[in-house]
Image (spheres, grey):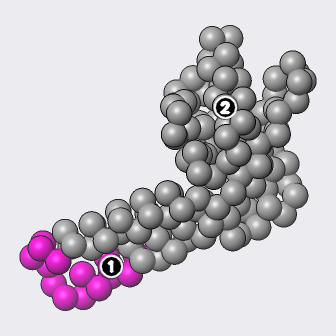
Amino acid sequence: MNPITVKLLPSRMMLWLFVATAVFISGILVLVPLAFWSRIAILSIIIVNLLYFSCRDALLVFSWSYTSLNINAKDQLQLVRKDGKKLEVNVQENTVVTAYLTVLNCQRQESTFLQRLLPLHIVIFSDAVNADDFRQLRVWLRWSKLKL
C-alpha cells in the first residue's frame, strides 16, 4: 500500500460547533437557579474550555496540536504535532467514519497506565482536510476496521 499523508487544517465547522455549544450551555446556566458566584465560576470554566479546545483542536494554535496523519506502507498510523513530535498509535475499533466527520479513536503504542485509561480522540471535519486525502483516510480506516 502507498503511504498516505493527511494534513490537518483549521476547521471552521469545529470552531462554530464549540462556540454554539458554549453559548447553549451558558444559556441554560442563566435559567438554572444558582447563586451568582456559582454561575460566574461555571461560566468561567465554560469560557476557559471554549478557548483551550478551540485553540488546540479547531484553530491548531498550540505546539501540541495535531497537524497531520501519516500512514506508512506497513499500515501503521502516526500522528504529527505542530512542534514536529511524532506519535505512533493504534486505531481502535470504535472509530467513526462518515463522509463529513471522522472521529479517530486511537491508543498510543507505548503508553503509560494513565494514557491507556485516556485514549486519544481526533475529530476531523471535512473542511479541515483536502478532499482526496480525506477520502483515502476514510477508505484506509474502513479497511483497517475489517482487519481488526
Percent coordinates x, y for residue 33 in the rendering: 9, 76
Relative placement, left or right, of 77 versus 135 is: right
Crowding near the residue tagged with mark 1, few <14, some 14–19, many ≥20 C-alpha atoms within 10 Å: some
**Residue 41 counted in the magenta span:** yes
* Residue 22 lies in quadrant: bottom left
The residue singled out by tag 2 in the image is 135
Crowding near the residue tagged with mark 2, few <14, some 14–19, many ≥20 C-alpha atoms within 10 Å: some
Q: Which mark is residue 109?
A: none
* Residue 144 lies in quadrant: top right
From the viewer's side, name the closer residue of 115 and 7. 7
Relative placement, left or right, of 37 versus 119 is: left
Percent coordinates x, y for residue 98 in the rendering: 51, 31
Number of numbered labels in the structure image: 2
Magenta residues: mostly which secondary structure? helix
Is there any visible trace of residue 137 in the rendered image? Answer: no
| Nearest to N terminus: mark 2 or mark 1 | 1
The stretch in magenta equals 30-45
